[in-house]
Image (cartoon, helix red, strand yellow):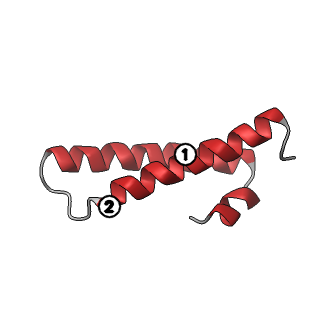
């Protein structure tokens, strides 16, 4: 997801997306451990998206976004 799309989501939608991404990251790490991961770049993309979501949530928390 792009940064602009993340900024348009509500707090509840961001929290749901964060939960989905953390589950996906756990699944990808499990696949990597079992040596069944086809696209290892996907782990980096998911980690980056999680960081972006946490940044937007923090902006809401401290009042930068409303």
Using the numbered discs, state the Cα–Cα distance from disc 2 to disc 1 in whole angstroms: 16 Å
Quadrant of residue 33 in the image? Answer: top left
Place of residue 55 in the rendered image (x, y in percent of width and height, measured from the top left): 65, 44
Q: Is residue 41 left or right of residue 58?
A: left
In which quarter of the view is residue 9 placed? bottom right
Measuring from the top left, give residue 12's x and y in whole percent: 70, 45
What number is the disc on residue 10? none
Number of marks drawn:
2
Q: Label 1: few (<14), some or many (≥20) within 10 Å?
A: few
Comparing 11 with 57, the one in front is 57
Q: Is residue 24 above or below residue 3?
A: above
Q: Dividing the image into 4 quarters, which one contains the N terminus? A: bottom right
Report which residue position mark 2 lands on. 41
Residue 47 is left or right of residue 53, and the answer is left
Q: Secondary structure at mark 1?
A: helix
Relative to 25, 15 lies left or right: right
Residue 51, numbered circle: 1
Residue in the picture at 35% in, 60% down: 42
Q: Secondary structure at mark 2?
A: helix
Query: Which of pointers 2 and 1 lies earlier in the amino acid sequence?
Result: 2
């Amino acid at each position: 997801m792009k940064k602009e799309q993340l900024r348009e989501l509500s707090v509840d939608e961001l929290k749901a997306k964060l939960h989905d991404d953390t589950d996906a990251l756990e699944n990808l790490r499990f696949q990597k451990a079992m040596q069944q991961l086809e696209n290892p770049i996907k782990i980096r993309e998911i980690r980056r998206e999680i960081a972006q979501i946490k940044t937007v949530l923090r902006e809401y928390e401290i009042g930068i976004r409303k």
